[in-house]
Amino acid sequence: MPSGRVITHLRQHLTTCASVVLVCHAVLKPPWEPSLNSLNPVDLLDPTTASGVVVYGLVAIAIAALGRWGRRLWVQPLRRLILSLPYVLRRPLMRLAYLLVPSWRSFSSATERQAHNLQDRINALSKRKRVPVCAVGGTYLDILFGPVDLHPPWDAERSTLQHVDISVGGSCYHLCKHLWDGFQIRTRLFTAIGQQDWASGILESELRRLHHVRPEMTMVPGARAGTSVHAQSVDLGSSPTYTYLGSVEQLRWGDVLVKMQKAFRGHVGILYLGGVLRTDLIGDMPDAIRQLSPGVLVVIDPGRTDPELGTEKYTQLARLLRLGCGDILIMSPTEMRLFLKANGLDVPEADDGAMLAAAADSELLPRVTIIRGQKASGYPKAALILDGRISLQQGDDSHWTPGAKIGGLQAFNAALIRELMRERSRLTLEDRLSAATRNALIYWSSQD
């Protein structure tokens, strides 16, 4: 923007603001205040007088306007200048800029994120002594009770409950818990909680009490805490979960992005997005991911959603994946089947092989997709899809029976994140991901 236009816009804004302030001054002026014609120049610099408040208010407005237009003038030319330098000079200058000002990408429209740099992002994890791990998603108050008859007579009351447990839950919370319990890895948890009910107070106090998690909580005024109710059936089999989203569905990037940029100011890290289909994160995800360092590895586990309500969410997720928002996608077979159907693919209900083939042949997935979460007993298994190629991986326990433990699947995700941090730079990307998936299956079967 030319300097002449800047001055013109600034003059227009100052004139408008001055008119509003002077009108307010004339209306609200105390009787002991002097008139505008008899103002003493010294009073203009006295913040205790109405005229002084007007002057200082105009100065503040002028500084803010100059800063805004000044940023437009120098940010893009400076960025173009840096990009025109040789690579040996450009890389350290950009690293220094992101280290000093982590939010640089937010107002410079800078992006260097490329899908083919996936192996570089994974290799960089093992070169850092401490890798920042940020988990973003919903946190719930879990209420577990049982055993119950899932089909009681109408209008019946039972006093046969043997336990009622209340605890913190949610996929991101359980991921952080497994990372600490199994691998002593500390994490940052970005979530949203309400302010209107007792459950929100319990969630806030319990999260602040955790020594292995640094909670970054967004307080949503007027919202209630997300709550999940788990009924344990009499036969100890699987049972439905009923969830009230509450504050979870109001979690947005604008509430967490700046703090996340500071967490990843060292250029390397892991961002885990858990249960994003239930939040508002899916809306402006491309712009948010673009504003993060290109060295951050993005792992997405969209989580479960209502089949009748998830069609639109799954089509949005496919669009985001095509835009390169995720590096690794983790799903269960049921979730993958719903994802493919929502995006127009005809997938057989009981044929997992056909489902895997349809997923690999589609253009809906990122470079790496892992499908895990079996229900049958036997070796723990997972399917790894890398660049359209399917490889089946399995653990070492042939007598393993999948449990119904809440948060059990997050044991696999936590172990996978830990395995990606290990030093395996001499291996190919496929061998490295295969080894990480197998070891994650072994850890999962030992925990669930």
Image (cartoon, rainbow, N blue to C red):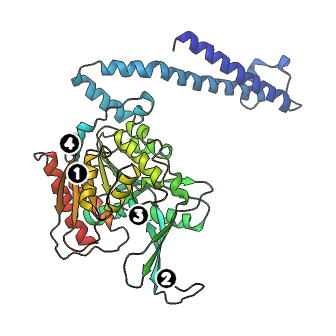
Residue drawn at 71 percent across, 30 percent down: 47
Q: Are marks 3 and 4 in contact (CB under 8 Å)?
A: no
Where residue 30 sits, quadrant-wise, is top right
Question: Horizontally, is 8 left or right of 158 in the view?
Answer: right
Q: Say if residue 184 shows up in the picture.
A: no
Q: Percent x, y for residue 346?
A: 34, 53
Say which residue label 1 marks. Answer: 385
Whole-angstrom CA distance, mark 1 to mark 4, is: 15 Å
Say which residue label 3 marks. Answer: 210
Q: Earlier in the sequence, mark 3 or mark 4?
A: 4
Q: Earlier in the sequence, mark 1 or mark 4?
A: 4
Whole-angstrom CA distance, mark 1 to mark 3, is: 36 Å
Mark 2 crowdedness (10 Å alpha carbons): few <14, some 14-19, many ≥20: few
Q: Are marks 4 and 2 in contact (CB under 8 Å)?
A: no
Whole-angstrom CA distance, mark 3 to mark 2, is: 38 Å
Q: Percent x, y for residue 358?
A: 27, 51
Q: Percent x, y for residue 362?
A: 29, 46
Question: Which mark is in front, 3 or 4?
Answer: 4
Residue farthest to the right, as pictured: 31
Whole-angstrom CA distance, mark 3 to mark 4, is: 33 Å
Say which residue label 2 marks. Answer: 151
**In this view, 7 is above or below 232:** above
Q: Say if residue 8 shows up in the picture.
A: yes
